[in-house]
Image (tube, rainbow, N blue to C red):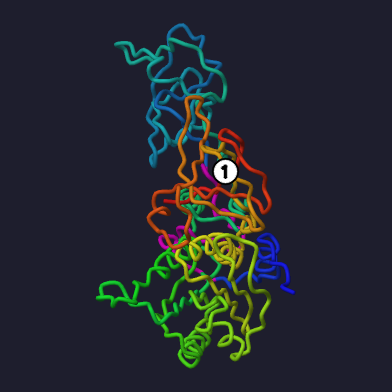
């Protein structure tokens, strides 16, 4: 009797459970975009280091606003060139945005709210409150403050904050090393002239792209024939390179020429599971060979793409310490057409996204869902997720989608 297929959620749980965050390395801030911080990053200075002006105008003492003869201008404070003296009674200093507030001043009057008379006196035209238009010392962060936490992804804003905190280098988690090997007698590389029984190998390009987007360093081992010795050679190459994850493409099913699982087992792979309740992507292999994790993806290109999105990318992110690696970014929508009841596997349907007159998100499945069709994939903006055994849907019913990055 055939054993029941493993659910997608259980498969993801097994893949992500027990993942050890990789070692850290220190890299220049210029090369840190997209990387995950290995530990919290603390400020090496206070920002701003002193009280500074938030606007162009005049630094003054608010208690002097009522003086009938105006305020005497005694100097200027500019960014990088502050006024060194002490502001006394009835005095003001011309000040520019980002400039240090002179000692004695407690507010900045906007320049458009001041009138300069012929004798050089400054006459406020509006009132200003104490502390107004001043950025206090440490408003952004103070020295020693941990402003970026471990696991933070270094996006443009995080890079700017790290630089402002005076870090030229940052500690990040090492990128996982991913080896990809595709197998199949029918495969040839792009640019070659295929024979009548051959097809162009394309899966590795999509899988490599998804792996890089998730933060992995990818090594393409190339194409391998459906031959036990050839497959073992590729596996041995991955082991010699000490990669963290070996991704295989094709040869994971049960046909006479599907030799990948036997090749992995002969090398000593500890098989965790094989075959899951998912469409597309039923023949999925997951196991380990020493410290190297094995993810055997189906040969159909859409199945390989979807399985990479659902399993490989979260694994790569988890190895870098991404606290959201296990979260599935689902978004509510409404269905754009009628669908029959789903069968016994969770279905990931390619779908286009539009908005209706009420700005509701509409997900319309592509007319063809064959797992070999890449054109349908490029014309889709999301995967419509239907649970195993889900009831029929009528146009306008609620549904859930995973957006596809472009």
Seen in the image, is 238 located left or right of residue 272? left
**Image quadrant assignment for residue 265:** bottom right
Q: Which x, y percent locates residue 81? A: 38, 40
Q: Position of residue 270 (x, y in %)?
A: 67, 83
Q: Position of residue 261 (x, y in %)?
A: 58, 82
Depth order, front residue of 15/122:
15
Residue 228 located within the stretch drawn in magenta: no
Query: What residue sits 57% from the left and 55% below the top?
Result: 152
User: What residue do we see at 46% from left, 89% from top?
Assistant: 227
Region of the chain picked out in magenta, as a range? 25-49
In the picture of the structure, the residue carrying the numbered disc 1 is 339
Principal secondary structure, stretch drawn in magenta = loop
Crowd tier of the residue under label 1, counting other residues whose Cα lies within 10 Å: few below 14, some 14–19, many 20 or above? few
Q: Against 80, is 253 above or below? A: below
User: Does 229 appear above or below 371?
Assistant: below
Answer with the quarter of the image where residue 31 lies.
bottom left
Which residue extends farthest bottom?
229
Residue 237: % across, % down: 47, 87
With 365 as the anchor, is 279 left or right in this view?
right
With 15 as the anchor, is 35 left or right in this view? Answer: left
> Which structural element holds mark 1?
loop
């Amino acid at each position: 009797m055939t054993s029941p297929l493993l659910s997608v959620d259980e498969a993801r749980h097994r893949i992500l459970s027990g993942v050890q965050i990789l070692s850290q390395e220190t890299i220049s801030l210029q090369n840190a975009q997209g990387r995950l911080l290995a530990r919290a990053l603390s400020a090496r200075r206070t920002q701003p280091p002193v009280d500074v002006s938030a606007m162009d105008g005049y630094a003054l003492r608010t208690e002097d606003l009522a003086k009938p003869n105006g305020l005497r201008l005694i100097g200027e404070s500019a960014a990088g060139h502050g006024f060194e003296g002490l502001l006394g009674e009835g005095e003001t200093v011309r000040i520019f945005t980002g400039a240090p507030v002179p000692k004695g001043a407690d507010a900045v009057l906007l320049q458009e709210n001041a009138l300069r008379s012929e004798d050089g006196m400054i006459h406020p035209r509006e009132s200003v409150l104490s502390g107004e238009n001043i950025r206090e010392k440490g408003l952004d962060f103070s020295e020693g403050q941990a402003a970026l936490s471990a696991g933070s992804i270094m996006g443009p804003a995080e890079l700017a904050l790290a630089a402002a905190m005076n870090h030229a280098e940052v500690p990040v988690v090492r990128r996982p090393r991913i080896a990809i090997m595709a197998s199949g007698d029918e495969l040839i590389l792009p640019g070659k002239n295929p024979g009548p029984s051959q097809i162009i190998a394309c899966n590795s390009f999509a899988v490599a792209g998804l792996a890089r987007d998730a933060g992995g360093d990818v090594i393409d081992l190339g194409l391998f024939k459906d031959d036990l010795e050839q497959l073992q050679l590729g596996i041995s190459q991955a082991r010699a390179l000490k990669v963290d994850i070996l991704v295989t493409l094709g040869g994971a099913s049960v046909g006479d020429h599907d030799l990948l699982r036997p090749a992995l087992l002969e090398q000593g792979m500890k098989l965790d599971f094989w075959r899951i309740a998912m469409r597309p992507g039923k023949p999925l292999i997951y196991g380990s060979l020493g410290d190297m994790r094995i993810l055997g993806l189906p040969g159909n290109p859409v199945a390989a793409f979807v399985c990479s999105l659902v399993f490989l990318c979260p694994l790569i992110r988890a190895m870098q310490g991404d606290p959201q690696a296990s979260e599935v970014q689902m978004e509510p929508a409404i269905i754009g057409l009628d669908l029959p009841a789903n069968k016994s596997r969770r279905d990931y349907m390619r779908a286009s996204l539009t908005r209706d007159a009420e700005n509701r998100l509409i997900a319309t499945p592509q007319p063809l869902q064959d797992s070999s069709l890449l054109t349908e994939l490029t014309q889709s903006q999301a995967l419509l997720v239907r649970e195993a055994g889900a009831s029929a849907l009528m146009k306008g019913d609620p549904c859930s989608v995973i957006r596809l990055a472009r």
